Image (cartoon, helix red, strand yellow):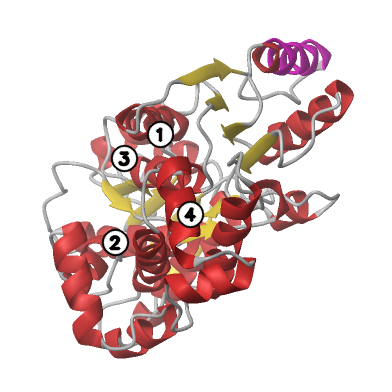
Amino acid sequence: MTRSARRVALMLDLQWPYKRHAEVFAGIQRYAEERSWVSIIDEFAHDTLRRGRGTPAPYDGIVARANHPLARRAAARGVPVVNVWPSSPARHLLPGVFPDSMETGRLVAEHLLARGFRSFATLTSRQNADNEFEVAEFVTLVRAAGFECASAFVPQDSHRDLRHWRRTVQSIDRAMAGWVPPVGVYVGQEVCGRLVVQAGHRRGWRIPQDVAIVAGKNEETLCEQPRPSLTSVEVGYDRIGYAAAGLLDHLMTGGAPPAEPVRVAPVGLVVRESTDFFAVGHPVVAAALAYISSNSHRPIGPADVARAVGAEPRTLQNYFRATIQRPIATEIRRVRIERAKRELARSGRTLDAIARAVGFGNIQRLYEVFRRELGMSPGEYRAQRRVRAE
């Protein structure tokens, strides 16, 4: 006898046109089609579970931006739920699949540090659990590099009413009054990133020369227009949806929930105009850093960099050591490693193809550098950063 298709409810606040809603839904649907599930959008699944007590549960499982009533009623009726809302009030009651927010904070900090910034700030919401982890890791890396970070907060829902909007604008102005340009800033939401740009213009600050901004989770409409476009983090929310569906499948077949939430590493940074700047006082070093950033995938060395900026190799080497405290070859290698890490996290290309594409030339060299610099092989790094469908 053939078992009927599983009925899976989706409670994802799909009226909001953001990636954390729509792309999670898309990832779930990709998994659902592979398993021939029946997907049912039910934004009030907690109410549906309350009705019809004494009858079979209406769903075999639920993926949700979960609230307390859903967690309570699903437990009472034996319906497994996977939570995909990191700031959910019920996040400690249910198994969850969330972005790896610490990796996001690390990604942003490494990007701004590599751009030569020595002054840093964050502008996020206290009510956002993702932001909490992001800022903690961001500040940790900045301090490890010998610098401090000024952290300030804005309301989570700036658009809720006029009072919240005014509070948001005032909070941004107060925070920026304490910034010392040039400053590298992480802003938790794209809209706030746009407000920072506007406030910077009112102060006569240039973006990115005075304030370099990484903002939000790559909502393209808000990031790309108006100029300057905003550098942002591509989370890969579809992967979160797919992983959440996979975890729900595991639970529906009697598997035990994981002890901790599943964390999915971000795809990488989408670098745009708001961080297209190297905050170093030496113009020749700044030009050299820009050349390395654009050409590290090619077989370049210190002599090529020196030639590109019209300097003697030994002179440029001295400039590098005095300005950014590392030699030219180290900077080339660092940029190649960052390119390789992004490729390993977000593409299915072979290790040999990645090694050639990012400038290492061959897989042996890629392996040697990763072992020495990161303490792991490229394959081990990829396994840690990517969610694979079993």
Dot 3 lies on which element?
helix
Instruction: Give the amino acid at mark 4.
Output: Leu
Q: Do the residues under discs 3 and 2 have CB atoms within 8 angstroms?
A: no
Which sits earlier in the primary sequence, circle 4 or circle 3?
4
Q: Do the residues under discs 2 and 1 have CB atoms within 8 angstroms?
A: no
In this rendering, the answer to whether 271 lies above or below 171 is: below
Q: Residue at x 48, y 36 (%)?
A: 47
Dot 1 lies on which element?
helix
Q: Disc 3 designates what residue?
A: 74
Q: Nearer the viewer, mark 2 or mark 1?
A: 1
Within-10-Å neighbours for mark 1: few <14, some 14–19, many 20+: many
- Residue 113: x and y, percent? 46, 42
Residue 208 occupies quadrant: top right
Q: Do the residues under discs 2 and 4 have CB atoms within 8 angstroms?
A: no
Region in magenta: 162-174
Q: Disc 2 designates what residue?
A: 385
Q: Residue at x 32, y 47 (%)?
A: 81
Which sits earlier in the primary sequence, circle 2 or circle 1?
1
The numbered dot on residue 10 is: 4
Q: Disc 1 designates what residue?
A: 138
* Residue 97 visible to an observer of this rendering: yes
Distance Cα–Cα, label 3 vs label 1: 37 Å
- Residue 243: x and y, percent? 33, 62
Instruction: Give the amino acid at mark 3.
Output: Ala
